[in-house]
Structures are given as C-alpha cells and as structure tokens.
C-alpha cells in the first residue's frame, strides 16, 4: 500500500505562507478532491507532494521516506502528475508526449512506443498518436495528457484543475475517467474549483473526500455526501450555495451573498 | 532514422574527399600539403563544427530557446575577452607549450561557464535567468573587449581582428590532439543525456515528475558543452553561427525529435564547417578567407531563408 503524506507542511515564499500546517495523506484506492479559491495554495500543495517544491518546515513523504530524498526514477514510480500549465514548446506529436511518461522505466524505445500506444488506445485517443500536440483540441489534449500520466503507471496520481477550458461534455467525460481511476486502485488527488464538477466524479464504491483549502491552510475535510458541505463550501469561497435537487443529483448553485462576509 | 544515416554517410564521404580537392598535391611538397596541412585541417573542421553544432542543439533544448547557442550564452564572449587580454598585452608565445592566447581564451571561457553552471545548479534558478545572465555577460565582455581594442596599438589591433574572425590554424596534428579529448567527452556526455533532453521538451516540471534529473541534465549539458566550446574557441577563435544555425538546419532535415536532432547536429555541423573551410581556402586562389567569415556569410542568409520559409 503506497501512501504519500504531508505533515505540518509549510512553504514560505517572499514572507508569505503559501501553505501552512497542512496535514494530508493520500493512499491507493482513495479519491480526494481539493477545492479552494484562487491563490489558496492548491498547486503548491501538489508540488510539495511531488518534491517539486521544498518545504520550509514539516515533511512530505512517500511510504515514510522524504520525497526529495527518493531517487528521481523511484519517486516517478510512485507518484505522477497532470500539471495545470501546458509547457509543451515544440511540435511533438501525441505519441512522443505519452512516451515521456515511460522515462522512468529505462526501457527500449520500441517498448516505450508500444506501451504509449496501449495507453493512448485505453483513453480512446489511439488515432491521435501522430497528431501534433499543438493541433489537438483542449479535450483531445487532456485525453493524451491522461494517457501520458497513466503510462507512468504510478499508484498515486495528482491532477491540477484538469478540466480547465473544457466544454461541459468533455468535463463530465474527464471527471468520470478520473473517478474510475480510484475504483481501479489508484490514489487520486484532484485539485479544482469547479464545485459542481465534483459530482461527475463517479465513484459509487469509493468514498469521495473533499478537502477545502484557503489561504494556505485546510479549512475542512468531509465526505461528498456530507449535509453541511454546501455551507462549508460557501464560507470557503465567500458565496452562498443554493442546493437544488434534480432528478439525478444534488446541484449547488452559487448566489451572491449580501450578508456580512467573514 | 534513414535520413540520419544518409547524413552520416554524406558527412564521412565529404570529410574523406575534402583533402584531395584543390591544387593537386605532387612530390614531397605535395605530400606535406596533404598530410600535414589538408588532412589535419579537415579533421579539425569536422570536430570543431560537430562540437559547436551539437552543443548548440543541446543549449536550444535546455534553454527552450531557439537563440541559445555557445555564442549567445557567454562562453564565446568570455573566451574572446581572455584572448584579447593576452593579444593586446603581447604575452609570450607559450604557456607550457601552448600559445598564451589560447590559454587565456580557455580561462576566460571557463570563468563564464562556471558562473552559468553555478547559477543553473541552484534550486530555484529559472532557466530563462540563466540565459539572460549569459547574454548580460556577453554584453559586458563585449564592452570590455571594445575598450581594450580602442586603447591598443596597431599591431595588437590587427592580431585581435584576425583572431576574432575565427580560423582553423593547422600545421600538423597538435591541435587535433588537443581538441580530441574535449570532443570525445562532449559527444559521450551529451549523447548520454539525449533521453532526458527529449523529455524536457514537454516542460521541465513535467519531466521532473516523470523521473528526469533536471538539474543534472542542465549542469552536465551546460557545463560539459561549454567546456568543449571553450577549448574550441581558445584554439580557433569564435567561429560564428555554427552553433546557432546548424541545429536549425538539422531540425529542418531530421525533425524535432532529440533522438535524431542531437546526433544529427553533430554530423551536420561537421559537414557544414568542412565545406565552409573548403570554400575558404579555395574560393580566392592564393588567398585564404578565414572560416569564420564564410560561416557567417553562409549562415546568416540561411537563417533568414529558414525564417521566411518557416511553416506555421
């Protein structure tokens, strides 16, 4: 059982705490959604788990070993990441992108390619293999990026606002794929501020845990079906949520709150 | 892959044929010209061109910038400054058997290299900052160089101008033996980093999360690359454009995959400089045009043509 853990994690940049007193664990087969307003420190938290950002105090570990002391390939065998910012800067094709996920295996190029094609096919993106990255639509890119992440074959996977810029159908599609990962045994941590989208993370057998982050610290942690969730989210984002029960699900509609803000 | 093979074969054929092009070598003098002048000189051009171009391709990948090259990140400028100091001060001809100018140039380039590699190795260093610092160092070194030239006498100035044009000075094999270890080191180290460099193309941070030791690749690529360039510039002067242009030409021929581009740049650079040198020594009968003039004269229009023809 692989477990990544942040304990009393604190990151300071230019005198400002990006995250502080953060305790969080991520285990295989669990689904955690991290929500919070812009600048809450969500990305910093992910980057700390990955070892990309050094902590100023506290610890970030994978199975008890500080993540930054792990060998690069060892770490990449445990935890993978779908970043928010697309930094692809050259006309590589989808297949090459996905092959990046195979780096840690140190395998032959042929084996990398076979594995990459398999993962592209699994995401229904097999026909995109030879397409240039920059010619892909937003939805196609996310499917290829997901294939790249899964090609790394890590037990733990992190997503940073994966559905940004996607149209509603692609958002639903992506979130349900992410939900399936937890059912398949991955430990998933997904950052978002699309509250409503949380409901598309289907995961009947796995509980979806929601963590609210604001100004660098964790404000609440509860299950998705928690009755007080709308209230908690409201104070997290400084809005009020109206709960609307539809035939299929409970929807949260944000409304402007004229009451006193905290 | 086929194209790379074709490039390799072409390069080897051209290198093998070049010494025999030109006035036919006859008799004892002819055999001297062939064995002690043309052959070593062709070999030198092949090594220098290949090294500069391969380092350029690696720099462009590391810095994620098409303008990164030995001449733009400060290595060359440091060498020029070192050489100028030696030339103008009229230092003795040798330091433990090596020309003082080459030694000073090598030291100048190394200082800049260590500054840059030190910055690149820092945890929080952004690669853009490293490139900017290289450009700043180039400008500063250029200003000091101009100052030195302005205050130097006629003889010193003539030497300086000759040196800064770039040349492939060859009588015998001394230069070959000097450059060869650097050449082999650079080729071996850079080829060992091809896989990592390829991963960098999708973003440094993503590459890190995929298991690439980004810092090591940066420091090795920058440090070893610049070490090789320092040796070359010390011996041959700043040969313009090879490290900047040839990787772009190679990219048009072989595509952007680093697996092909980096070794391809090595051979393309060799081919380019051997041909430039051939033109330089045979274009004007009885006179020799410094190879740096030819590379710039050919390289600049090539770059312009590439930009204009560039597909979106």
Image (cartoon, coloured by chain):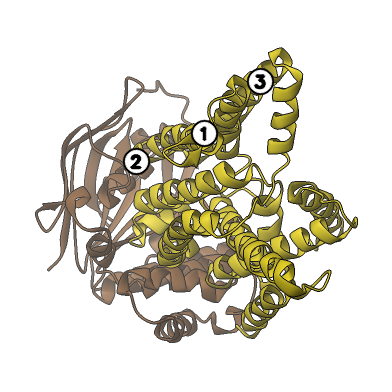
Determine crowd level at label 1: few under 14, some 14-19, many 20+ residues with C-alpha closer than 10 A: many
Q: Which of these two is toward me, A125 or B202? A: B202
Quarter placement of the N terminus of chain A: bottom left
- What residue does disc 1 label? B100
Residue at left offset 63%, top offset 63%: B36
Q: Residue furthest left?
A: A64
Chain shown brown: that is A
Q: Residue B293 in the image: state x and y as whole percent.
A: 79, 47
- What residue does disc 3 label? B143
Q: Name above or below for residue A224 compared with residue A253.
A: below
Look at the image and tell me whether residue A251 can be seen.
no
Q: Residue A246 in the image: state x and y as whole percent.
A: 45, 62
Closest to the camera, between mark 3 and mark 1, is 1
Q: Which of these two is toward me, A6 or B44? A: B44
Q: What is chain B's hue in the picture?
A: yellow
- What residue does disc 2 label? A44
Picture quadrant where residue B53 is located: bottom right
Look at the image and tell me whether residue A132 can be seen.
yes
């Amino acid at each position: 059982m692989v477990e990544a853990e942040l304990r009393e994690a604190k990151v300071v940049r230019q005198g400002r705490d990006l995250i502080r007193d953060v305790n969080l664990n991520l285990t295989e087969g669990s689904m955690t959604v991290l929500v919070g307003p812009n600048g809450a420190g969500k990305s910093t938290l992910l980057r700390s788990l990955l070892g990309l950002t050094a902590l100023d105090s506290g610890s970030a570990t994978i199975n008890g070993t500080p993540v930054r002391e792990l060998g690069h390939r060892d770490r990449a065998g445990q935890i993978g990441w779908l970043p928010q910012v697309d930094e692809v800067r050259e006309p590589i094709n989808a297949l090459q992108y996905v092959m990046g996920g195979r780096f840690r295996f140190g395998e032959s190029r042929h084996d990398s390619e076979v594995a990459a094609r398999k993962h592209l096919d699994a995401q229904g993106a097999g026909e995109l293999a030879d397409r240039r990255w920059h010619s892909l639509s937003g939805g196609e890119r996310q499917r290829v990026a997901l294939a790249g992440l899964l090609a790394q074959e890590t037990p733990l996977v992190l997503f940073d606002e994966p559905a940004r810029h996607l149209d509603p159908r692609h958002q639903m599609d992506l979130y349900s794929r992410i939900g399936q990962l937890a059912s398949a045994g991955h430990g998933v941590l997904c950052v978002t501020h699309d509250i409503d989208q949380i409901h598309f993370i289907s995961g009947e057998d796995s509980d979806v845990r929601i963590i609210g982050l604001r100004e660098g610290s964790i404000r609440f942690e509860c299950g998705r079906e928690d009755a007080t969730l709308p209230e908690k989210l409201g104070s997290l984002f400084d809005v009020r949520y109206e709960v609307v029960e539809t035939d299929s699900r409970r929807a949260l509609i944000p409304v402007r709150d004229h009451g006193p803000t905290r | 892959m086929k194209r790379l093979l074709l490039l390799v074969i072409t390069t080897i054929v051209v290198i093998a044929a070049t010494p025999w092009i030109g006035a036919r070598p006859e008799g004892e003098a002819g055999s001297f010209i062939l064995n002690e002048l043309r052959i070593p000189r062709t070999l030198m051009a092949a090594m220098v061109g290949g090294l500069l171009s391969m380092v350029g391709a690696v720099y462009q990948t590391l810095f994620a910038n098409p303008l990164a090259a030995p001449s733009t990140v400060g290595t060359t400028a440091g060498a020029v400054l070192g050489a100028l100091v030696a030339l103008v001060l009229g230092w003795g001809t040798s330091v433990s058997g090596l020309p003082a100018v080459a030694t000073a140039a090598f030291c100048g380039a190394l200082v800049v290299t260590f500054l840059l590699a030190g910055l690149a190795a820092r945890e929080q260093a952004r690669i853009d900052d490293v490139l900017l610092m290289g450009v700043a160092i180039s400008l500063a070194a250029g200003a000091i160089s101009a100052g030195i030239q302005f205050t130097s006498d006629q003889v010193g100035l003539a030497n300086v101008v000759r040196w800064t044009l770039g040349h492939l000075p060859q009588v015998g094999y001394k230069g070959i033996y000097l450059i060869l270890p650097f050449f082999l080191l650079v080729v071996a180290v850079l080829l060992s980093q091809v896989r990592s460099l390829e991963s960098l193309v999708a973003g440094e941070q993503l590459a890190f999360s995929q298991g690439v030791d980004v810092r090591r690749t940066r420091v090795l690529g920058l440090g070893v690359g610049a070490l090789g360039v320092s040796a070359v510039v010390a011996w041959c002067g700043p040969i313009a454009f090879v490290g900047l242009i040839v990787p772009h030409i190679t990219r048009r021929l072989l595509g952007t995959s680093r697996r092909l581009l980096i070794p391809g740049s090595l051979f393309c650079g060799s081919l380019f400089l051997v041909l430039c040198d051939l033109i330089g020594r045979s274009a004007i009968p009885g006179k020799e045009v410094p190879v740096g003039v030819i590379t710039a004269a050919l390289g600049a229009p090539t770059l312009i043509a590439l930009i204009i023809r560039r597909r979106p």
